[in-house]
């Protein structure tokens, strides 16, 4: 279970998307939300903040993906990753599911859908 004091990392190359997600989480009561825009920045912030949850965009700039970032982060840090994407194409969804996400949200993300995805997380 994620507590209101736990760190959450939002990875999205679009600043407005990150800000919107951060605001939604803050309104839900989560106080420690950090953002990253690139694979490298996400790895550094995951090492620094040790998030209890990561919201990871699938497509990042420069042809990189959130799957790349997730694979690197999972080498040293294990936490649930909910992927977010603007694409509802089967091929994209299949690639995301291969990365074993804890959830998947399709943009635009509504607060109730984000809340439900967090509530659905199962911690081992």
Image: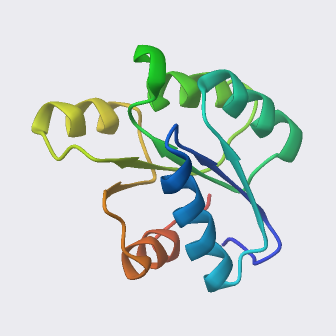
Q: Quadrant of the C terminus?
A: bottom right
For residue 97, above or below residue 44: below
What x and y, as percent, mark residue 47? 83, 34
The residue positioned farthest toward the left in the image shown = 90
Residue at 76%, 38% in the rendered image: 46
For residue 98, above or below residue 68: below
Q: Quadrant of the N terminus?
A: bottom right
What x and y, as percent, mark residue 104? 35, 54
In the image, 83: left or right of 43?
left
The residue positioned farthest toward the front in the image shown = 16
Foreground residue, 123 or 48?
Answer: 48
What x and y, as percent, mark residue 39? 60, 25
Snapshot colouring: rainbow
Residue at 72%, 75% in the rendered image: 30
The residue positioned farthest toward the right in the image shown = 48
In the image, 87: left or right of 3?
left
Foreground residue, 81 or 66?
Answer: 66
For residue 82, above or below residue 94: below
What x and y, as percent, mark residue 58? 39, 36
For the image, the number of numbered tags is 0
**Residue 122 shows in the view:** no
């Amino acid at each position: 279970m994620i507590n209101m004091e736990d760190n959450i990392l939002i990875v999205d190359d679009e600043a407005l998307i990150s800000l919107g997600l951060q605001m939604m989480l803050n309104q839900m009561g989560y106080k420690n939300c950090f953002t990253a825009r690139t694979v490298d920045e996400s790895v550094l912030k995951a090492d620094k903040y040790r998030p209890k949850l990561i919201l990871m965009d699938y497509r990042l700039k420069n042809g990189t993906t959130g799957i790349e970032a997730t694979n690197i982060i999972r080498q040293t840090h294990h936490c649930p990753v909910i992927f977010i994407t603007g694409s509802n194409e089967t091929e994209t969804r299949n690639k995301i599911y291969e990365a074993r996400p804890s959830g998947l949200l399709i943009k635009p993300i509504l607060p109730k859908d984000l809340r439900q995805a967090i509530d659905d997380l199962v911690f081992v």
